Amino acid sequence: MTWFLIALLSSFLSAFAAITQKKVLFDLNPVEFSFHLAIVNLILSIPFFFFINYDTITSYNLFILFIKSVIGVLAFLCVMTALKNLQISNALPLLALTPGLVAVFAFLFLGESLSSFEVIGLISLIVGTYILESKSLKEILFPLNVFFKSKYHHYILAALLLFTASSVMDKLLLVKLDFTPVSLTAFQHLFYALLFFIIFLISEKKFDVKRLFATKKDYIWIALISVLTLGYRFTQVVAINMSSVALTLAVKRTSVLWATIIGGRIFKDSNMLKKIIAVLFILLGAILILRD
């Protein structure tokens, strides 16, 4: 059960990272925040490079990690954009829909059958999502309208697909390509810093050196987020290395419950009881789908 405790720790760290991210995003835009966080993450990751067995590092597995990092960067930007513009108790629970999307895509495109538990899990995900996004029972189509018309919900859907691919590639890198949790964490944050720096430069209409630095207050919060981020990413990789991707993600997804309850109260989100009930349905669905 060691993997379970590590995955649960990753869940708590992820929840508190999301809450502090929401606070900083009141002052910074998603690209600006992601860039500064990536730089601090890289600085804090420097010690990891001294514990890497470089004999296992090849140009091929670094290339695969770089592709995985591109996917991770895009997913992170999608989440930060949604988190800045949506209530935290609306944005984060939708990320727990990942197992449902994986099951549906496997059924549609790979011909994989769905077990009774997976069908029940999908129904639970749908019910939870409906409760989360609905205004009232009278407006039965409101949740569908939200997903079709709200561009920030589109960012969440994009992040769901990207995070799914990223998690599968984690397992590939750790099991097939000889990366250790330490080497994966170190090089991933190196690539993240490089990619976010490029995106930051591209997003700047007029380059100003001063924009490369945040305020002292922002850096204090970013440093805290960085510690939490390194913590949940590293513990997730360790848990995946000890168990399956599916089981680890099932436990990790409980972060949305902690973030919804705690973050919702901090930021005074509306309809908290309804959202907590919705999150429980979504988590139940994810667990049922990932139970095997």
Image (tube, grey):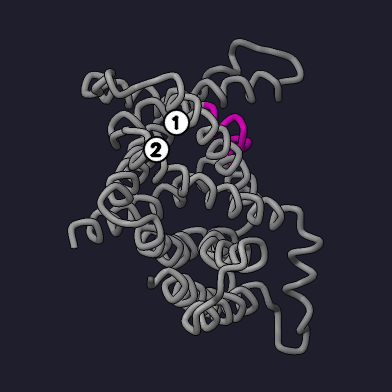
| Residue 35 % position (x, y) | 54, 27
Q: Nearer the viewer, mark 1 or mark 2?
A: 2
**Quadrant location of the N terminus?**
bottom left
5 on left or right of 288: left
The quarter holding residue 119 reads bottom right
Query: As drawn, which residue projects farthest toward the bottom?
Result: 138
Q: Give the range drawn in magenta.
A: 26-35
Identify the residue at image location x=67%, y=66%: 108
Mark 1 vs 2: CB contact within 8 A: no
Q: Can residue 22 be seen in this view?
A: yes
Identify the residue at image location x=50%, y=84%: 116
Q: Main secondary structure of the magenta part?
A: helix
- Which three-letter amino acid code belongs to the residue tagged 2? Leu
187 on left or right of 129: left
Residue of label 2: 173
For the residue pair 229 and 56, the one nearer the viewer reads as 56
For the residue pair 199 and 52, the one nearer the viewer reads as 52
Residue 217 marker: 1
